[in-house]
Image (cartoon, grey):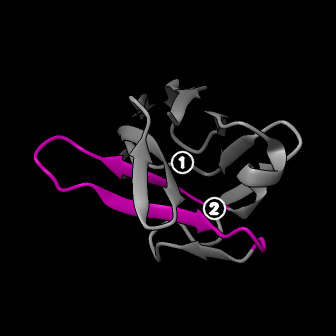
């Protein structure tokens, strides 16, 4: 059973930075290295949306709203995925979720809240 645990959220000032982490419980780092991983977010009253994705081959994709400000990365040996958020804006306030794609099956973490204060 795959489990994901996000951490690193909290209160951050507008224009500041924060790094989110996602730890994956999978049998081996070799398996983990093959999985596509993503960060999603959901703000109150809005639908969950893709923030950034990284494939097993380290190809990255970003939502237009975060391009140039956020960076997704992974450490396969540690079975971790990160989201470095810089120059954060009020509209980045949301619950951030980590997602693992294993052969078409999606696994989600519980989420970590990021609140941007002005």
Disc 2 element = loop
Is disc 2 surrounded by few (<14), some (14 to 19) or many (20+) residues within 10 Å? Answer: some
Residue at 32% x, 61% y: name it. 49
Q: Position of residue 44 (x, y in %)?
A: 17, 40
Disc 1 element = loop
- Would you place residue 28 above or below residue 50 in this image? above
Q: Is residue 80 left or right of residue 12?
A: right
Residue extending furthest left?
45
In the picture, the quarter occupied by the C terminus is: top left
Q: Quadrant of residue 5?
A: top right
Label 1 with label 2: CB-CB less than 8 Å: yes
Residue at 28% x, 47% y: name it. 42
Q: Nearer the viewer, residue 1 or 58?
A: 1
Residue annotated with mark 2? 69
Q: Is residue 97 left or right of residue 6?
A: left
Is disc 1 surrounded by few (<14), some (14 to 19) or many (20+) residues within 10 Å? Answer: many
Residue annotated with mark 1? 88
Q: Is residue 79 left or right of residue 110?
A: right
Residue at 76% x, 40% y: name it. 79
- Would you place residue 19 above or below residue 33 in this image? above
Is residue 54 rendered magenta in the image?
yes
Give residue 113's mark.
Answer: none
Q: Position of residue 21 (x, y in %)?
A: 65, 34
The mark nearer the N terminus, 1 or 2, is 2
Q: Nearer the viewer, residue 78 or 13?
A: 78
- Would you place residue 50 above or below residue 7 in this image? below
Residue bounds of the magenta highlight: 35-58
Q: How far apart are the two marked residues, 1 and 2, measured between alpha carbons? A: 8 Å
Is residue 57 rendered magenta in the image?
yes
Q: Position of residue 73 (x, y in %)?
A: 75, 55
Q: Position of residue 7 (x, y in %)?
A: 58, 25
- Would you place residue 60 above or below residue 96 in this image? below
């Amino acid at each position: 059973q795959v489990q994901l645990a996000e951490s690193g959220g909290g209160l951050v000032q507008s224009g500041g930075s924060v790094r989110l982490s996602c730890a994956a419980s999978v049998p081996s780092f070799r398996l983990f290295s093959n999985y596509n991983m993503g960060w999603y977010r959901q703000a109150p009253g809005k639908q969950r949306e893709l923030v950034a994705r990284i494939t097993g081959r380290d190809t990255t994709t970003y939502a237009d709203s975060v391009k140039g400000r956020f960076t997704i990365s992974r450490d396969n040996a540690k079975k971790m995925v990160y989201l470095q958020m810089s120059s954060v804006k009020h509209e980045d306030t949301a619950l951030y979720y980590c997602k693992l794609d294993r052969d078409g099956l999606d696994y989600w973490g519980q989420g970590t809240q990021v609140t941007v204060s002005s």
